[in-house]
Amino acid sequence: MWSLAWPWVLLALPLPLIARKLLSESASLQDAGLKVPDLAAFAVLRERRQTGQFLSWRFWIAVVAWVLLVVAAARPERIGDEVEVPVSGRNLMLAVDLSGSMDQKDFELGGRRVDRLTATKAVASDFISRREGDRIGLILFGERAYLQVPLTLDRETVRVLLLEAFIGLAGEKTAIGDAITLAVKRIHDQDADASEQVLVLLTDGANTAGEIDPIKAAELAQQVGLRVYTIGIGAEQLEVSSLIGGRRNINPSADLDEETLTGIAEMTGGRYFRAKDTAGLQDIYRLVDELEPVAEPEAGFRPIKSLYYWPLGGAFALASCLCLVSLLKSLAMRPSGELPDAV
């Protein structure tokens, strides 16, 4: 569908006719005096008669150029078909642990052993891509908690900034309570009226830093209606080389505080998940998708493409042609032996 953003601008179309009429009346008043007759007027009339046909087509080109210019000022635009946009009203904040223990290589990805953060990036980025319609934010925490991305519908930016995160960026220790408190503050300050507020917190350890106890932070989340899903990441068994030779098995997740993570989730109406490998982490994020389903299309908009540059370009091209013709005519009427004024 075609339309004009400012159709009232078309009222300017007759302005040249009005201006010409007013100027003609003014000129006739100025000429109403006694003149000494001479032959100069006859020469002007003869030139106008000879070039009347030439001025005629120039006049119509000028008219077309003016019409195109006015149409361009009215901003023609093309309105496309309605596009449905899923709008859930859900605020979904991700909190990812960047402490030193996330460097433990007890996960596999693509047939090779990788650290916990690399596996988390791969799985969480797919999760972010699926959350169409949610406002997503990103918190990175270690010894301190930082808001990396505020709540936004730009999922690609959240995904890219998550992939750019690295271990130790926020310190070597783990401040779970500060991460939850920061999520509560940012969600409440930015959009406290959202119908659904969710925090997905992933960590591989216990709260060893920060100013706020995790359970106290969970109480704050409960008061504002923030539902927290906690994910404990790390394998339960890993084979390593022994100092005296041979191989031995260790538990790389011995520091994981599952009791506190479970208490946080239960207090806020969420759930605690345990991710022991990459496949388990993928299953957890898919389960979160089921518990917090992506919204169905609820609203729509019509894309608008502005087309003013087409008539504007046409008007400019016609005006350029008229200027070029006038220049060529003035050069042709110059006597052959006369040099240009500039010379």
Image (cartoon, grey):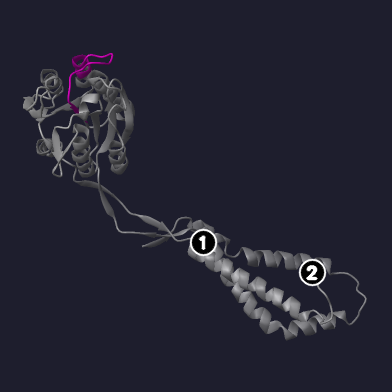
- Residue 317 figure quarter: bottom right
Q: Nearer the viewer, residue 113 or 201?
A: 113
Q: Nearer the viewer, residue 36 or 107?
A: 107
Residue occupied by mark 2: 28
Q: Residue at x 60, y 76 (%)?
A: 60
Task: Kindly identify the amino acid type of the residue bearing the numbered disc 2.
Answer: Ser
x then y, percent, for residue 81: 30, 58
Relative height, residue 202 to residue 87 (above, below): above
x then y, percent, for residue 208: 22, 16
Characterize the local packing of mark 2: few (<14), some (14-19) or many (20 or more) Cα atoms within 10 angstroms.
few
Q: Residue at x 24, y 39 (%)?
A: 134
- In the rendered image, residue 215 lying in the magenta stretch gets the answer yes
Residue 26 located left or right of residue 261:
right
x then y, percent, for residue 301: 31, 51
* Camera sees residue 32: yes
Task: Kindly identify the amino acid type of the residue bearing the numbered disc 1.
Answer: Ala
- In the rendered image, residue 252 lying in the magenta stretch gets the answer no
Helix, strand or loop at label 2? It is helix
Q: Nearer the viewer, residue 323 or 13?
A: 323
Relative height, residue 296 to residue 19 (above, below): above
Residue 27 located left or right of residue 223:
right
